Image (tube, rainbow, N blue to C red):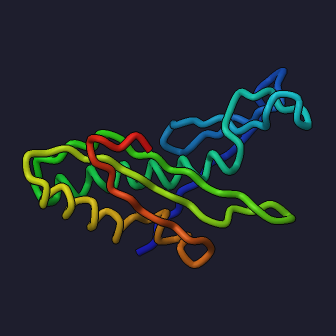
Amino acid sequence: MSRHVGVTFSPVSGTGAGLGHTETGHAVIADRPQGKVGGTGLGLNGAELLASALGGCFWNDLHYVAAERSAAVRVVTVKAEVELAGTPMRIVRARIAARLDGPDAAACQDVFDRARETSTVANSLTGALAISFERLTSGDTK
């Protein structure tokens, strides 16, 4: 079974930004930094959008897995970042870090590990770039 998901972008009047709409009614703004080829800085650039896709997907996966396992796990934070290099510039690696809370440390680790194994966006990109996952503890500030 396959599924199609898409976003259609159109201009934001009076700006250089693009407003993306999904069929489900959600929206996102893509733009360049202020002063860069007409950019107004209203939205995310492509690298930020990709980092958002990685982090948002993992955020959701953590919740799905916790619910499937009936685990008392709270997702505290997910941070996703990408590294750009080369000419032409491309994303060469990504890092996803997450902090989970719960009374059972083993359950937190299990949820993290299973979400890492099943994360749709990360699994789709692993052939193109290195993606690392890190489970943060309450003392981590990364």
In the image, what residue occupies the spot 40% across and 46% down?
78
Q: Quadrant of residue 89?
A: bottom right
In the image, what residue occupies the spot 8% across and 52% down?
104
Vertically, is 103 above or below 14?
below
Q: Residue furthest front?
A: 139
Vertically, is 8 above or below 18?
below
In the image, what residue occupies the spot 71% across and 43% down?
45
Q: Residue furthest right?
A: 37
Q: Position of residue 105 (x, y in %)?
A: 13, 55
| Left/right of residue 114 with respect to residue 133 in the rendered view | left
Seen from the viewer's position, the closer of residues 58 and 83 is: 83
Q: Quadrant of residue 37?
A: top right
Number of numbered tags placed on the structure image = 0
In the rendered image, the quadrant that contains the C terminus is top left
Seen from the viewer's position, the closer of residues 78 and 61 is: 78
Q: Position of residue 65 (x, y in %)?
A: 23, 58
| Left/right of residue 120 with respect to residue 112 in the rendered view | right
In the rendered image, the quadrant that contains the N terminus is bottom left
| Left/right of residue 76 with respect to residue 49 in the rendered view | left
Q: Position of residue 56 (x, y in %)?
A: 45, 48
Q: Position of residue 73 (x, y in %)?
A: 17, 47
Q: Residue furthest bottom?
A: 127
In the image, what residue occupies the spot 37% across and 49% down?
59
